[in-house]
Image: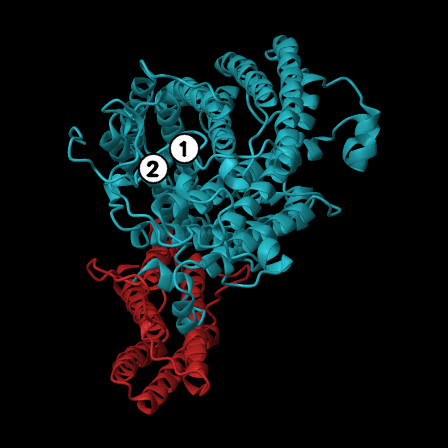
């Protein structure tokens, strides 16, 4: 099955032959609707994912600024808050209900909408066909559906913020009973109904996307593009899709049971509950821990769904901008594989303190700590790729190096948290918050920024502004450490996460100034993101135009397409691939593209 | 389907067929999640023992028969025996509907025996049976809808399409939901 046949499966093949191979861009007459709205072009779908993700990133970031305001200034009142939040900030003071709703929505939105859909949705769509040499995805139609399911999920989630009882406020993990009983809290009513509908739509979107990514990588590679010649971005996006396809259905199972508990009176998760103002509930025999198992069976792979695309892009960007082959290509692929396998075997480390059998806990400790091995291999290979490289500090490169820095800092605390004994002290403390924000949240955001700065010229045929990008980078990296580093100390001192007001606690009062400092930095970093947003949207229309097909002098196939590739990506035949993606600085040549045949006098490759 | 580039590489699996296999892997994970939750729950307190509806034995026979007709349909399609093919996919879809109705009567049977599936009086043992079976029914319904789409395609005379790919994709899925039910049935009877 060739790529041509798939892309044109729905068109008249006879006409296609008559046109010959040189008219791919003129095949379909495109209207505004088919080009920008219901597009089936993977590049346009990628941009749709990216911009929707960016909208959510701004909203989710703004939520964190609002709840940091409460944590940093618990006694102050901000009358302007009442004007935007209304009854949720009576007298200019965020109410506890609003605080929990903000924390919950911040978590849900950032984890799923920004760092799953916005990150792997964008770059899997954009890079897979371009880097493997395909005209489009295996099923462009399913790909379009994937975006529109995500869009529908977004609308439902957004609407949950405007219902009278507020959005769901029981944490992004949606543990029952808070998520199962409408009477448990205001957010557990309509807000939770909308949350669960939104998440179900999101799971469908992820599955449709993931199926497509896997089928495309395995079946639609151009001639000569063997699996071991794939750029590491594609390997990472491939494993990401596998993780998603195997873990999201389990989450959906958990949600289905939750829906029955919520709406049809079953007792999967509920037992012996007394609700204040309602009385004792008839539910008997359920187990809230069961939900945690089902949730974290997705939840843990989910953090790798977030992280792996960033790892893949960083590998590519580091190699291109060090003008050196990636160090240990096969070790990189092997460690991605190992991470993907281990991701499914460690979920119970989120549940060490739920009364889990300590023997079982020790097995999960071992498996969890094993992840340090592939992670360390990756870090080692990134550093050795940089080592004695001819480094070009482009904005993409800076963010890629920033990613490596954050991954090391955040990964080391993972070794602490993976121990079930230490977890007794550290669980549900700010230490956990610091750990996962650095290693998964901020690091993956850095991977995303690196990807955007690096592939922006391919997306829009223009450059982004470097000065703004440098300001964005330095403020963000300094801010990320200033926000999350102190949280480690707070966590070690026992400061619990999710608390609304620490000033009334004798043991945590001492951190008031530190909290204020963190909040201040959070606001500055949030503001600095507007350097990026302005740069991004301004450059789409007014950025310096690209005159060169291959601005970064990279080897991969996407840089052999025209500056503004049409639907079908290549004019004429898809190029054939003759070598791996990392021939930098070989035989005295700065770079050799994958499409260059291997010369007779070339050294071993 | 013709190709414009001469394909020298060994015959690869069609991407749509491949995507179907991945999707089935995904559905397997969903039911694996469900049945492992069932096992976890079963080992805890207050688990109700009850007899499965007898009709589930007959519905199992029906879905098995539908797999046979599906197999014959796709064989007829490949042999270009279009009228035979149309009859066979119609029978397959019909058997699918009969299966769904029989499952519904299975629920009715439980209800008649005063075994609550949902609601405050329900026991998780029955709720699990109900939710998992319902979920499987939805997947069968999806297969029936796909068969109806094939059926509509086969009767459209304006476009002659002899591609066997859609039939094979739907056929694979149909056999899959069949095997899935066999698994669930064995699970209910002897494992769960």
Tell me the residue that label 1 is attached to: A313
The chain that hosts pointer 2 is A
Nearest-to-viewer mark from 2 and 1: 1
Left or right? Give the position of A188 relative to A603.
right
Q: How many marks?
A: 2
Say what secondary structure mark 2 lies in: helix
Q: What numbered label is drawn on residue A112?
A: none
Q: CA distance from mark 2 to mark 1?
A: 20 Å
Tell me the residue that label 2 is attached to: A343
Q: Quadrant of the N terminus of chain A?
A: bottom left
Look at 59% across and 51% down and name the residue there.
A151
Q: Are marks 2 and 1 in contact (CB under 8 Å)?
A: no
Horizontal and vertical percent for residue A296?
A: 42, 40
Horizontal and vertical percent for residue A422?
A: 38, 19
Q: Is residue A259 above or below residue A290?
A: below
Q: Quadrant of the C terminus of chain A?
A: top left
Q: Is residue A493 above or below residue A92?
A: above
Within-10-Å neighbours for mark 1: few <14, some 14–19, many 20+: many
Q: Which chain is red?
A: B
Res. A287 visible in picture? no
Look at 65% across and 38% down and name the residue there.
A541
Q: Are marks 2 and 1 on the same chain?
A: yes
């Amino acid at each position: 099955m060739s790529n041509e046949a798939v892309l044109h499966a729905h068109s008249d093949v006879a006409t296609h032959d008559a046109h010959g191979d040189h008219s791919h861009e003129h095949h379909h007459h495109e209207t505004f609707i088919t080009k920008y709205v219901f597009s089936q072009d993977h590049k346009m779908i990628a941009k749709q994912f990216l911009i929707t993700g960016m909208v959510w990133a701004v909203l989710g970031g703004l939520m964190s600024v609002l709840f940091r305001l409460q944590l940093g200034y618990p006694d102050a009142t901000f009358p302007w808050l009442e004007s935007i939040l209304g009854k949720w900030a009576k007298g200019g003071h965020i109410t506890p209900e609003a605080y929990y709703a903000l924390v919950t929505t911040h978590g849900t939105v950032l984890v799923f909408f920004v760092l799953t859909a916005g990150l792997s949705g964008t770059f899997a769509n954009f890079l897979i066909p371009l880097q493997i040499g395909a005209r489009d995805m295996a099923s462009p139609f399913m790909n379009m559906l994937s975006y529109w399911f995500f869009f529908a999920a977004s609308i439902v989630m957004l609407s949950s913020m405007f219902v009278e009882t507020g959005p769901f406020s029981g944490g992004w993990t949606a543990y029952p009973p808070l998520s199962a009983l409408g009477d448990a809290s205001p957010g557990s009513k309509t807000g939770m109904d909308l949350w669960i509908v939104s998440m179900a739509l999101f799971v469908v979107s992820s599955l449709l996307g993931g199926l497509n990514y896997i089928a495309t990588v395995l079946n639609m590679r151009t001639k000569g593009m063997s699996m071991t010649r794939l750029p590491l971005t594609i390997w990472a996006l491939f494993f990401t899709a596998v993780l998603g396809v195997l873990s999201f259905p389990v989450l959906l199972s958990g949600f289905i049971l939750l829906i029955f508990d919520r709406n049809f009176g079953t007792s999967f998760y509920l037992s012996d509950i007394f609700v204040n103002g309602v009385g004792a509930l008839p539910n008997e025999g359920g187990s809230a821990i069961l939900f945690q198992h089902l949730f974290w069976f997705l939840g843990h792979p989910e953090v790798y769904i977030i992280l792996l695309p960033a790892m893949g892009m960083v590998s590519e960007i580091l190699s291109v901008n060090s003008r050196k082959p990636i160090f240990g290509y096969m070790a990189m692929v092997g460690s991605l594989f190992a991470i993907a396998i281990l991701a499914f075997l460690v979920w119970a480390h989120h549940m060490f303190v739920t009364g889990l059998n300590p023997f079982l806990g020790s097995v999960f400790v071992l498996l969890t700590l094993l992840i340090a091995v592939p992670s360390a291999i990756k870090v080692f290979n990134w550093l050795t790729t940089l080592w004695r490289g001819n480094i070009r500090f482009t904005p993409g490169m800076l963010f890629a190096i920033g990613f490596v820095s954050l991954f090391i800092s955040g990964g080391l605390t993972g070794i602490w948290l993976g121990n079930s004994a230490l977890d007794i002290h550290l669980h549900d403390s700010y230490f956990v918050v610091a750990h996962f924000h650095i290693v998964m949240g901020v690091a993956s955001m850095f991977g995303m920024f690196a990807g955007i700065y690096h592939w922006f010229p391919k997306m829009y045929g223009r450059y982004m502004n470097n000065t703004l990008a440098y300001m964005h980078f330095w403020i963000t990296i300094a801010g990320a450490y200033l926000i999350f580093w102190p949280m480690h100390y707070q966590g070690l001192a026992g400061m619990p996460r999710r608390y609304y007001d620490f000033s009334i606690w004798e043991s945590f009062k001492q951190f008031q100034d530190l909290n204020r400092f963190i909040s201040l930095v959070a606001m500055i970093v949030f503001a600095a993101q507007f350097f990026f947003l302005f740069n991004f949207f301004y450059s789409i229309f007014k950025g310096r135009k690209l005159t060169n097909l291959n601005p970064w002098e990279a080897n991969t196939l996407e840089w052999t397409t025209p500056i503004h590739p049409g639907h079908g990506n290549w004019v004429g035949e898809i190029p054939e691939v003759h070598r791996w993606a990392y021939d930098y600085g070989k035989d005295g040549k700065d770079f050799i593209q994958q499409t260059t045949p291997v010369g007779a006098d070339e050294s071993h490759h | 389907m013709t190709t414009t580039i001469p394909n020298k590489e060994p015959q690869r699996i069609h991407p749509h067929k491949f995507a179907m296999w991945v999707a089935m892997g995904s559905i397997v994970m969903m039911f694996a999640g469900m049945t492992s939750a069932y096992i976890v729950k079963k080992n805890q307190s207050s688990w109700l023992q009850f007899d499965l509806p007898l009709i589930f034995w007959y519905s199992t026979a029906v879905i098995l028969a539908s797999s046979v007709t599906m197999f014959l349909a796709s064989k007829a399609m490949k042999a270009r025996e279009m009228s035979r093919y149309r009859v066979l996919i119609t029978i397959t879809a019909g058997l699918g509907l009969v299966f769904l109705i029989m499952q519904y009567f299975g629920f009715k049977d439980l209800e008649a025996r005063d075994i609550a599936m949902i609601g405050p009086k329900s026991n998780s043992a029955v709720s699990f049976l109900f939710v998992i079976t319902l979920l499987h029914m939805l997947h069968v319904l999806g297969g029936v809808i796909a068969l109806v789409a094939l059926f509509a395609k086969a009767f459209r005379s304006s476009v002659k399409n002899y591609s066997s790919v859609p039939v094979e994709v739907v056929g694979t899925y149909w056999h899959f939901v069949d095997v899935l039910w066999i698994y669930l049935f064995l699970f209910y009877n002897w494992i769960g």
